[in-house]
Image: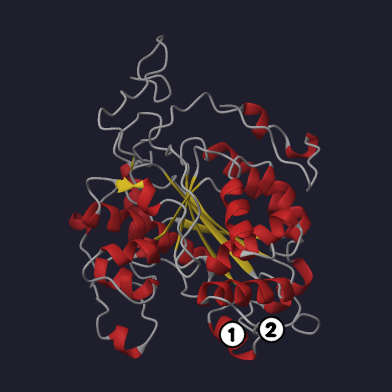
Amino acid sequence: MLDHKTGEKGTEQRRPLPREDNAEMLLDYKDPIMVKSNVIESDEEETIQILDKRKNQTISEYDSESSSENEDAISTGECSDKDLDLSIIVPEIREVWNYNLYDAFSQICRLVGDYPFVAMDTEFPGIVAKPIGNFSTMDEYKYQLVKCNVDLLKMIQLGMTLFDGEGNRPPGVCTWQFNFKFSLNDDLYAEDSIDLLVNSGIQFEQHSTEGIEPVAFAEMLLSSGLVLMDNVTWLTFHSAYDFGYLLSQLTCQQLPESETEFLETLRLYFPNMYDIKYLMASTDNLNGGLQKVANELRVKRIGSQHQAGSDSLLTGEVFFKMYHDYFSEGLDDMKYNGYICGLGAGAPNSTSTPSKIHRELFDETVCMELSELHVSIATSPVRNH
């Protein structure tokens, strides 16, 4: 069997041939380093038992964000055993609290080398303030709206789901839902947003007692191999607030004063990122929120809507379905990479994409025992290129 890191056993690593037209496209080269089939190895009889057990469980499929979207939702009946694909098992969303933060990042660190596409979503306590003053452009006002709320509020949840270059997830746990320290008694919030999150199943009492400290999360994320890496791509949906909260936690600072500085800093930590909402402008018929787009593309939701883990999983699934349906010839980085819907014109684009960067042997020192790492919030892990 061929080694997925070398192309063949005992020989040097294969490198993709350069494109003659010099066009920069995402996922247009099926590098064996970036593509890995995801088949769960298990006994067939055991798999059938697992699937039979789950046939009677309720899983939200094509959930809707409004009554109008509900009319477009697709209902599916039970499948017979002969229709079930034994290689597919419902992915697991892992709840992460302060007590298992280390274990979660240890697992992510081991997987990111083979699954370098990170779908991300956040849940935050709404919008409580509006900027005042004179603004020269609407873009400036939009950024200041994001900044003043991110600076005042705390992130409640962050979801991350890993994928490889063909949209396959790791077997078993593929999604991590990070639950941050948050108190309804002490922290600011918009009441309607909190009501929505409570109805979605978020347990605020547990957040106040077992929630993750932002500094601890930042230390782990900085040493995980997920940020400051040219070979990792982040996938989001309408992500100005998502990246705003994440960048604020990574730097332990308020957001930069100007939108330009914000986008430049964001590009440093996240060299490759795609916003589905921005990509939708290049399609003829996709519009609305994440769930409406998922309904249109016939992508099933797993888990509860308005929880960051489920939303990140759906974001990644929608991205790859959208890619294959609308961008099968490739995504032009100059047009799409680094652009965030709702913020200015996006950041300057880098000249390379993770699909064409030759994967060096994954730096095993990044995945060393996290307890042995001495990471400062003000410093960043060294990257080898």
Q: Residue 346, how many percent across, how many down?
A: 48, 58
Is residue 58 in view? no
The Cα atoms of the two marked residues, 1 and 2, are separated by 8 Å
Q: Which corner quadrant of the image does residue 130 belong to?
A: bottom right
Q: Residue 150, how many percent across, how many down?
A: 67, 71
Q: Which mark is residue 75?
A: none
Looking at the picture, does residue 237 appear above or below residue 65? above
Residue 252 lies left or right of residue 229; in this view the side is right
Looking at the picture, does residue 319 appear above or below residue 226? below
Viewport quadrant of the N terminus = top left
| SS for callout 2 | loop
Residue for badge 1? 193
Mark 2: amino acid: Tyr
Point 79% across, 46% down: residue: 378
Residue 304 lies left or right of residue 204; in this view the side is left
Q: Nearer the viewer, residue 154 or 216?
A: 154
Q: Residue 110, how many percent across, how many down?
A: 57, 37
Mark 1: amino acid: Ser
Tell me if mark 1 has few (under 14), some (14-19) or many (20+) residues whose alpha carbon lies within 10 angstroms of its own.
Answer: some
Point 42% across, 12% down: residue: 12
Point 69% across, 83% down: residue: 189
| SS for callout 1 | helix
Point 34% across, 39% down: residue: 24
Residue for badge 2? 189
Say how many tags the image has: 2
Q: Cβ–Cβ below 8 Å for labels 1 and 2?
A: yes
